């Protein structure tokens, strides 16, 4: 097997795991449930990872997830698992939503004649190379996505925190009940 084949297989596994998305999701869920941390720490970690995935900072999501998990006293492993919420299949939706919210929040609205000339200039910049004028050409879009990503990230954090905390608490209660029943059966057999 050549190095190129190995690299292409690894890239494919990142986009579409060999075990399939559903099985991979179940695997991550079980990993989260079995972490040895408090329900708050697990929920805060997963929520931190999911929340930072709303920002267009690909490559920094793990680091930002760890920082947010540290601030909220979340579990770092859970934060790493939570960043899986942002992946090549979901990023287009997250970034479109963050841009839309950011564009609206910064006063964007209907296109006017001035916007049309600005769009024409942007088309010329793209033809000459997107970064022909440096980062200044991409700054308005990036700024709108960062501004729009913040309220979405807060909402995602709250939803994930509440859902994961409830699931972990319920899972642990069910597990304790099963273990108590198992101990009771063993005592009845030996007694």
Image (spheres, rainbow, N blue to C red):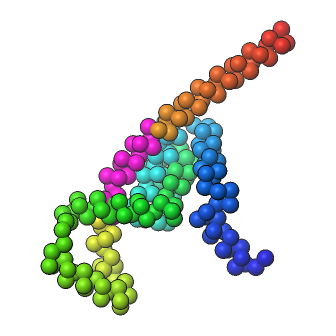
Q: Residue furthest right?
A: 190
Residue under the image location 50 percent in, 54 percent down: 85
Majority secondary structure in the magenta region: helix
The image position of residue 147, as x and y in percent, is 29, 60
Residue under the image location 30 percent in, 88 percent down: 124
- State the quadrant of the C terminus: top right
Query: In this rendering, would 128 be left or right of 58?
Result: left
Q: Residue furthest bottom?
A: 128
- State the quadrant of the N terminus: bottom right
- The answer to whether residue 60 is magenta is no
Q: Is residue 66 visible?
A: no
The image position of residue 112, as x and y in percent, is 15, 74
Q: Is residue 129 above or below residue 66?
A: below
User: Which stretch is magenta?
Assistant: 145-162
Residue under the image location 19 percent in, 65 percent down: 109
Q: Nearer the viewer, residue 48 or 4?
A: 4
Q: Nearer the viewer, residue 73 or 175?
A: 175
The image position of residue 30, as x and y in percent, is 63, 42
Q: Is residue 103 above or below residue 39?
A: below
Q: Is residue 13 visible?
A: yes
Number of numbered labels in the structure image? 0
Q: Is residue 71 above or below residue 162?
A: below
Q: Residue furthest top?
A: 191
Q: Is residue 170 above or below residue 184?
A: below
Residue under the image location 52 percent in, 50 percent down: 82
Query: In this rendering, would 126 be left or right of 86?
Result: left
Quarter-of-image position of residue 173:
top right
């Amino acid at each position: 097997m050549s190095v190129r084949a190995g690299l292409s297989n690894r890239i494919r596994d990142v986009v579409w795991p060999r075990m399939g998305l559903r099985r991979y999701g179940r695997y991550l869920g079980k990993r989260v449930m079995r972490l040895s941390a408090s329900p708050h720490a697990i929920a805060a970690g997963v929520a931190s990872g999911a929340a930072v995935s709303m920002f267009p900072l690909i490559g920094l999501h793990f680091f930002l997830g760890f920082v947010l998990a540290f601030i909220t006293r979340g579990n770092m492993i859970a934060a790493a698992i939570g960043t899986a919420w942002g992946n090549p299949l979901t990023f287009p939706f997250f970034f479109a939503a963050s841009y839309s919210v950011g564009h609206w929040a910064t006063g964007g609205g209907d296109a006017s004649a001035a916007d049309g000339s600005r769009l024409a200039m942007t088309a010329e910049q793209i033809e000459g190379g997107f970064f022909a004028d440096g980062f200044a050409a991409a700054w308005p879009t990036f700024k709108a996505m960062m501004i729009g990503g913040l309220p979405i990230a807060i909402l995602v954090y709250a939803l994930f925190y509440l859902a994961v905390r409830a699931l972990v608490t319920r899972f642990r209660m069910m597990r304790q009940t099963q273990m108590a029943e198992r101990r009771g059966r063993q005592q009845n057999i030996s007694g």
